[in-house]
Amino acid sequence: MNRSGEGNLMGLDGAAWSQPDRYPLSAKYDAAWVLSMDMGPHPLWQLEDLLTDLNLRPGMKVLDLGCGKGATSIFLARECDVDVVAFDLWIGEDEMQSNFDAQGVSDRVAAVRGDVRDLPFQDGEFDAIISIDAFEYFGTDVRLIPSLLRVLKKGGGIGMTTPALRTDPYQSPPPASVTETIGWEAAGWHAPEWWATHWSLSGLVDNVTARLQEHGRDDWLRWSRALDDGEESPVVAMLKADDNQIGFALVSATKK
């Protein structure tokens, strides 16, 4: 894999786009390759930021929940020296595995297709669970955390990132630009404080942290502009209209 992060990408300077000062690990990965793995806003920027709230150690076994095409799984294996189970509902095992083969991490990453609501793993099988830009699709269910924590060891870490609004949509209606772009899905863009309460009420986790990612909206806009084909997309218009509301919630905790 070309991990230089240099060159020109759709009119953007690759080195500037990669933001090496803020995301030095992610900057090693070629921007065009990351975009080719597109399943949502830059997953490696979100993951690298989230890792500061977790304590991953070499040799751990990590469940990468909702991994998409596997960019985050590749990153975890390479940068954290951990063994990864890449788990996703929408992407088939063959496609994921071909990506792992191409990047030379097949000895550290295994592809499994399935539904988070029916995890095919043993109790306490994982040292950590990570989910990047996927939790909004299933994690608002109060039954999810108890089911998910079954496969995590006691004291193990869990962390996720998900699109969020600074003011929770159940506290105040989302901005019109958001609902006009994503419709009812805005109901799942909970504020970090909502997620902290949601996890804490399970009674199963300690050390809950929840924050709105600094510059998350700007990162998302940079990513979306790189994907544009010359015409401004609805997502770009939404982000440009944002009045300090849109970003990503970064949430982590440890299993009691």
Image (spheres, rainbow, N blue to C red):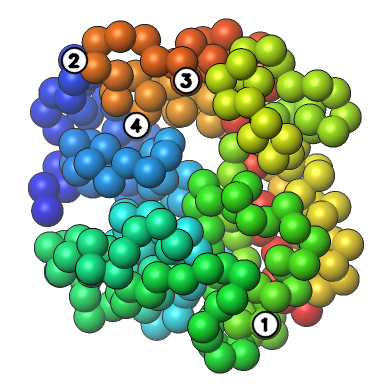
Q: Is residue 224 left or right of residue 35?
A: right
Q: Is residue 158 left or right of residue 218?
A: right
Q: Earlier in the sequence, mark 1 or mark 2?
A: 2
Residue 235 seen in this snapshot: yes
Mark 1, residues whose alpha carbon is within 10 Å: few (<14), some, or many (≥20)?
some
Q: Secondary structure at mark 1?
A: loop
Q: Between label 3 and label 4, give the one nearer the viewer.
A: 3
Mark 1 and mark 4 in contact? Answer it, CB < 8 Å: no
- Residue 21 in the image: state x and y as whole percent: 37, 34
Q: Looking at the image, is 146 positioned above or below residue 211?
A: below
What's the distance in space between the residues labelled 2 and 3, CA to CA? 19 Å
Mark 1 and mark 3 in contact? Answer it, CB < 8 Å: no
Mark 4, residues whose alpha carbon is within 10 Å: few (<14), some, or many (≥20)?
some
Residue 206 seen in this snapshot: no
Placement of the C terminus among the 4 image quadrants: bottom right
Residue that badge 1 annotates? 150
* Near-viewer residue (16 or 190): 190
Going by the numbered disc 3, the residue's amino acid type is Val
Residue that badge 4 annotates? 19
Mark 1 and mark 2 in contact? Answer it, CB < 8 Å: no
Residue at 45% from the left image edge and 28% from the top image edge: 219
What's the distance in space between the residues labelled 1 and 2, CA to CA? 46 Å
Residue that badge 3 annotates? 235
- Residue 71 in the image: state x and y as whole percent: 31, 54
Indicate the quadrant where residue 200 lies: bottom right
Residue that badge 2 annotates? 11
